[in-house]
Amino acid sequence: MKIFHIICAAVMAATIASCDAHQDFPDTSMKIGDILCTDGKVVRFEEMKAQEKTPIAVVFYVNQKEDIEGTGYAVYLKDIEPCAYSDSIGIKHDTSADLAAFDGNSNTHAIYSTYTSPAAEAVFDMWQYGQSAYIPSVAQLYLLYEVRNKINEYIRKCGGDEIQNNPDECWYWTSTEVKEQETDKAWLFSLASGAIQETPKTQAHKIRPIITLYN
């Protein structure tokens, strides 16, 4: 019986030692700079190349807050050419008009439902591969602005339109209307400086669509 206990103790010690031994596991957590592919998978750039997947967007934010929907955001590789937020002045598009809200998705749906927004229609027209693009809010574009240089590296590698630093090429529509001027103006955002500018809705400006991730 004593020998049996000694053997059991030796086996347990060996098991504990093997558990404590260092083991390398692949890091599968989503990171800024990962690539969203047309099959809906988010992978490292090297994996995308090795598996010959087709990129569609780059992860620019990984969510760690309970009040933000989804697990993160990805920005599409291409700009949408300049178009108007609204085809006429005098229409309230029922966005939150909240500069701090991460609500581009619901804003874009509200804008689209009025059937008066070339910008929203352009974004809805690009839906494919089950991905629901939308016009980011001011707060969401600020998240992109903060990491634009790192993101540009991957946009460039994937053959997309880099985020411009040129003062004449850096302004994008947000989906956020200007509070108390909702019928006439929405906010433009500079991805070069992080500045915002209230702008008549009938002006034509570029859009950089994003998507909420749920992986």
Image (cartoon, helix red, strand yellow):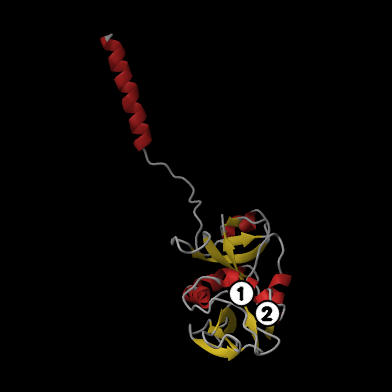
In percent of width and height, residue 75 lies at 59, 69
For marks 1 and 2, the one nearer the N-term is 2
Looking at the rendering, which quadrant does residue 164 occupy? bottom right
**Residue 3: which disc?**
none
Kindly give the residue lying farthest to the left in the view shown. Answer: 2
Q: Residues within 10 Å of mark 2 (few under 14, many from 20)?
A: many
Name the secondary structure under disc 2: helix
Can residue 168 be seen here? The reply is: no
Q: Nearer the viewer, residue 1 or 107?
A: 107
Looking at the rendering, which quadrant does residue 159 occupy? bottom right
| Image quarter in which the C terminus is found | bottom right
Total labels: the figure holds 2
In percent of width and height, residue 6 lies at 28, 16
The residue at which mark 1 appears reads as: 135
Give, as a three-letter code, the residue at label 1: Ile
The residue at which mark 2 appears reads as: 119
In percent of width and height, residue 150 lies at 50, 71
In percent of width and height, residue 176 lies at 56, 79
Give, as a three-letter code, the residue at label 2: Ala
| Image quarter in which the N terminus is found | top left
